[in-house]
Image: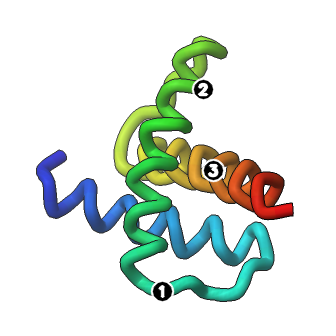
Amino acid sequence: MGLIGSIIIGLLAGLFANKIMDKSSDGCWWNLFLGVIGGFVGGWVFDLLNISWGGVIGQLGTAIVGAVIVLWIAARLKK
């Protein structure tokens, strides 16, 4: 998947993670950043657990899981 596809996946993952965590929207750029970082975190966590998803849906799922983890950590650090 190219750069544009990764950005779209990251944006969608950030938006979905915000909805899952019931957090107010922090803006499009924050969601994009969160989704991209979440993709790396999700990929790393799934690699540790030997979980492998294929295709665009798998990439989106991995990025969402990672973005939720990043949001959860950020919420804990703010307290």
Q: Is residue 74 above or below residue 18?
A: above
| Sequence-first disc among 1 and 3 | 1
Please, what secondary structure does the residue beneath circle 1 have?
Answer: loop
| Sequence-first disc among 1 and 2 | 1
Question: On the image, numbered disc 3 is attached to which residue?
Answer: 70
Question: On the image, numbered disc 1 is attached to which residue?
Answer: 27
**Cα–Cα gap, marks 1 and 3:** 16 Å
Q: Residue at x 65, y 15 (%)?
A: 49
**Amino acid type assigned to the residue bearing label 1 in the image:** Gly
Q: Residue at x 45, y 73 (%)?
A: 30
* Residue 21: image location, x then y, percent: 77, 68
Question: On the image, numbered disc 2 is attached to which residue?
Answer: 45
* Residue 64: image location, x then y, percent: 57, 54
**Amino acid type assigned to the residue bearing label 2 in the image:** Val
Res 66 quadrant in image: top right
Q: Nearer the viewer, residue 66 or 26?
A: 26
Please, what secondary structure does the residue beneath circle 3 have?
Answer: helix
Q: Is residue 35 above or below residue 51?
A: below
**Cα–Cα gap, marks 1 and 2:** 26 Å
